[in-house]
Image (spheres, rainbow, N blue to C red):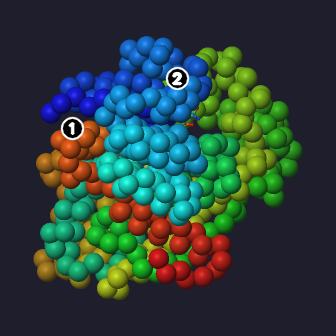
Amino acid sequence: MPVVSLVVIGAGNRGTNYGRWALANPSRAGVVAVAEPRQVRRDRFAAAHGIGTADAVEDWRQLAGRKRFADAVLVCTQDRMHAEPVEAFAALGYHVLVEKPMGPDEQTCRRIVAAAERAGVMLAVAHVMRYAPYTAAVKQIVDSGRLGEIMSVEHLEPVGFWHQAHSYVRGNWRRADLATSMLIAKSCHDLDWLQYILGLPPQRVSSFGRLSHFNRDHQPEGAADRCVDCAVEANCAYSAIRLYGGLLKGGEHGWPLDVVLDELTPAALEEAMRDGPYGRCVYACDNDVVDHQVVAMEFPGGATATFTMTGFNEGGWRRTRIFGDRGELTGDGETIRIYDFMTRQTQVVGLEDMGTMSAAGGHSGGDAGLMDAFTKAVALGDPEPIRSGPRESLASHLAVFAAERARLNGTVETV
Ligand SMILES: NC(=O)c1ccc[n+]([C@@H]2O[C@H](COP(=O)([O-])OP(=O)(O)OC[C@H]3O[C@@H](n4cnc5c(N)ncnc54)[C@H](O)[C@@H]3O)[C@@H](O)[C@H]2O)c1
C-alpha cells in the first residue's frame, strides 16, 4: 500500500493523537503539514513530524489556499469549526477525516456530507467506537443470530465525575452555544454505536435530562469561586487542585492535564489554578449543558433501547445489555457475557478469544482502528474500510438532534 500523506488541521488533543498514530506507522501515513494557531502546540507538532516552517501555519485557510499537496486532511478543530475546512479541502480533492460531532446542528452536518459528495471524496467521521475491537466482537455476536431477534437494549455511558467537571463544567464543552449540547458532544458516539450494532437508526425518540448539580445552588457554604481561595476545597470531590495537582505529581502528563497546561510545571499549574478556566469552582462556572440525561428509542420493527448518560460515577467504558429472544449479552467494554436460553449456560468471551486486533490505546483501540481504516481506504482508493461514512454518520447525528429536541420540548420526536 502506498504511504498516505496527511494534513492536520488543529494540533490539539485529537490532532496530536492521530499524528501519533502516523508516527508509529510510518509505512502507512505521514503528516506533511499542520495548521494550528497556538504556537506552542504548532511548534511541538511540527518538530515531532519534521515539518518545516512553510508547512506549519497558523490557520487552515493558508493551506487551503494552495493547490492540493497531500492525499487527505484530518479536521480536528472544535465542534463549530468543522464545516468550513471540510468544504474547502474537499473541493480541492482531499479525502477527509472529520472529528465528531460533524457540527452543532442538522444544517451543518448536511453541509459537510454534501461537500464530500459534491467533490467525490471519501469522508470518515471520527466515530471511533465503531472501530474498537470490542465493538467488532459485539457486532459479530449480534449479526450471527446467537441472541435471536433483538428486542431491547440498555446502554450506559458513565462519563465519570472528574471528566464531567473537566470537560462539561469547566472546559470546552460546558456551554451549548459555544460547543454543542451534551448529547451531541459526548453521546453522539452512543447513539451512533447503537445504530451500528442494531444495523439501523431509531425511528422515534424521547428524552429527559437537566443540569441538576453543577450550579450555584449546590455551592457549599463557605466555598469560594476558585479552588485556590476555597476554605472547603479539601472536602470537595471536584477540587481542581486535587485533580490536576495529583496528575502532575503522579507524572500523568497526557490528557486531561495537557488541556490545562502548555508547560507541565508546578508554576504553570499554580497560574492555571489562579487565573485559568480549570481553576474555577464547579459550582461557579458559566456552564449550561446537562449533567445527566436519558434517551428512550424505538427502532423500526419494534426493538426498543434506553440510553443513560451520567456524570455521577467512577467513569470507565460504556456498559451494555442486549436482550434477544434466544439470549442475553452483557458487555463492559472488555468482557462479553452471553447467556443462552436453551442451554441456560453463560459463556464469557474475552477480546482475545475473538481474534481481534489489540484493544490498547485511545478509546479502547478505536482511535487506532479509525486511522488504520481511513488510511487504508485512501491508499486503496476504496471507501470500504470506513465504517463511519457520511450517510450513516448523518443518520446517527439526526437521531441525536431529534432526542435533544425531545428533551427541550417534552415531545416524542420522529427521526
Ligand atoms: N472522536 C472522539 O472520541 C473525540 C474525543 C474528544 C474530542 N473530540 C472532538 O474533536 C474535536 C477537537 O477536540 P480537541 O479536544 O482536540 O480540541 P482542542 O481544542 O484540543 O484542539 C482543537 C485545536 O484547533 C485549533 N484551531 C483553532 N482554530 C484553528 C484554525 N483556524 N486553524 C487550525 N487550527 C485551529 C485550536 O488552537 C486547538 O489547538 C472537537 O470537535 C471534539 O468534540 C472527539
Where residue 397 appears, as percent x and y from the top left, is: 46, 63
At a point 37% along the width and 72% down the height, the residue shown is 201
Q: Can you say whether 216 is above or below 74 in the image?
A: below
Tag of residue 84: none
Image quadrant occupied by the N terminus:
top left
Snapshot quadrant of residue 145: bottom left
Residue closer to the observer: 307 or 302: 302
Disc 1 to disc 2, C-alpha distance: 26 Å
The answer to the question of whether label 1 and label 2 lie on touching residues, with beta carbons closer than 8 A, is no
**Label 1: which secondary element:** helix
Residue closer to the observer: 70 or 346: 70
Q: Can you say whether 385 is above or below 152 in the image?
A: above
Residue 89 appears in the picture as rendered: yes
Residue found farthest to the bottom: 302
Q: Can you say whether 335 is above or below 338 in the image?
A: above
Residue closer to the observer: 382 or 44: 382
Residue closer to the observer: 205 or 251: 205
The answer to whether 3 appears left or right of 256 in the picture is left
At a point 60% along the width and 45% down the height, the residue shown is 167
At a point 52% along the width and 28% down the height, the residue shown is 62
Mark 2 highlights which residue?
57
Check disc 1 and give the amino acid type.
Answer: Ala
* Mark 2 Cα shell of 10 Å, populated few (<14), some (14-19), many (≥20): many
**Label 2: which secondary element:** strand
The answer to whether 55 appears left or right of 61 in the picture is left
The answer to whether 218 appears left or right of 19 in the picture is right
Tag of residue 379: 1
At a point 20% along the width and 48% down the height, the residue shown is 382
Where residue 294 appears, as percent x and y from the top left, is: 54, 70
The answer to whether 265 appears left or right of 285 in the picture is left
Where residue 90 appears, as percent x and y from the top left, is: 40, 44
Residue found farthest to the right: 222
